[in-house]
Image (cartoon, rainbow, N blue to C red):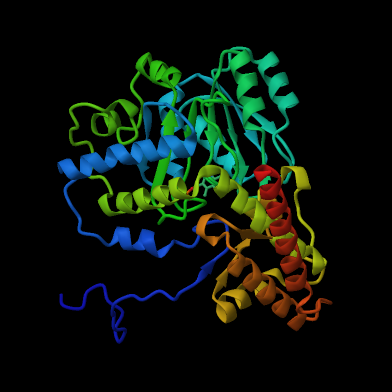
Amino acid sequence: MSSIGFIPGKKIGSFHPPQRILMGPGPSDVPPRVLAAMSLPTIGYLDPIFVDMMDELKQLLRYAYQTDNALTFPASGPGSVGMEMAFVNMVEPGDKVIVCRNGVFGGRMIENVQRCGGEAIVIEDTWGTPVDPNKVEDAFRQHPDAKVLAFVHAETSTGCESDVKTLCAIAKKYGALNIVDAVTSLTGVPLMVDAWGVDAIYSGSQKCLSCTPGLSPVSFSDAVVERVKNRKQKSQSWFMDLDLVLGYWGTTNRTYHHTAPINSLFALHESLLMVREEGLEESWARHRRHHEAFKSGLEAMGLEFLVKAEHRLPQLNAIKVPEGVDEAAVRRTLLQEFNLEIGAGLGPLAGKIWRFGLMGYSAKSSNVMMCLSALGSVLMDMGYPVKVGQAEAAAHQKYADLHAAEAKRRLADAA
Ligand SMILES: *Cc1c(COP(=O)(O)O)cnc(C)c1O
């Protein structure tokens, strides 16, 4: 009895993770302010003080998404729960859904449609290129009865951005609703839910929001609420049924649905407050600025991006592994010697790319310079022809150029 379940001779003590620098595809570095918020005393999920905080959370989220949607709240669960929440509510058995796949996450959307009993009309685009609006238009012409269009704004598996505004407009033209995956895009690149006509959108707390993992901010338009109300049969998911969740996250008569992840919500409140304090435009500009400097450094080392410049995500840099370099050994050494985590390629890109995240709190010059220095040192060690210092010099120069341009712009504005 006393030792059942334990490995003999192995003592278990408190767990102390090392201090890493997170420059992979998520999670990103969590700022001390957010970690501190998370460690505050737990209170009840219907405590009036907690309920007031929930209202603030909804306002902060509406700002981040640029929407007036009443139905905007953080779903309890990772980004995958937000994804599933959209599909299980909006897709009924037999519904046709046009799904765009240009990376890993579009593939998961197909799986969701099929598990809801829907019919997925799949549009394929090469990994590393954006969703092609012409193909979407063609699919709607062939399937004018399609009820939903689903696509990923920021494909984290490739570092490629698709055109949300154009794609949503096509869906609208054919009377379909849209589902947009904004897990990696929210606050990293411009995203305007109302102005661009987005119907259903979900994100994740651990990417550009730099909160702890496990929450999925979602927002649904009135048209989605209407569609859900008029379902012929109940959604197969009890946990994610919007009607039921609304009993807790709605505006009146809050009642128990499930126990909210109280302390995680404290953390999200703090990270969204940081977005509000910085301002969305500055958040987008900061991601762009550090990406530009990072890119200058990488290119000075002779490294190349997977995605064409005009479709690149500043927060997810997919870099081709040079010929003859052991990509896994590079990642392992960066983690062991430099406490630096970067991401590997997935699916057809496994072994072919590295993924460097510059998300949220990780998007800062100290990370950019440290990563260039560490990567340069590891590559040189492995015999790749790169001079340590070249990359840092190029990044410093880019920062200086960007600062000078900014100062000039300010002067012109003031004049
Ligand atoms: C990370 C990610 C998800 C899944 O989020 P989890 O929090 O890991 O469940 C979905 N879509 C995209 C584009 C992502 O980057």
Which of 399/137 is in front?
A: 399
Residue 390 appears left or right of 153: right
Choose top left, top right, bottom left or bottom right for residue 259: top left
Residue at 70% in and 69% down: 327
Residue 30 pos. (x, y %): 44, 61
Residue 270 pos. (x, y %): 36, 52
Above or below 19: residue 74: above
Above or below 105: residue 232: above
Choose top left, top right, bottom left or bottom right for residue 211: bottom left
Q: Is residue 27 visible?
A: yes
Above or below 150: residue 170: above
Residue 172 pos. (x, y %): 59, 17
Image quadrant in which the N terminus is located: bottom left
Which of 315/183 is in front?
A: 315
Which of 218/36 is in front?
A: 36
Residue at 65% in and 51% down: 288
Residue 112 appears left or right of 257: right
Which of 20/383 is in front?
A: 20
Residue at 39% in and 48% down: 273
Residue at 17% in and 51% down: 43
Count of marks placed on residues = 0
Judged from this view, the residue extending furthest toward the bottom is 9
Choose top left, top right, bottom left or bottom right for residue 167: top right
Residue 327 appears left or right of 13: right
Q: Is residue 186 visible?
A: no
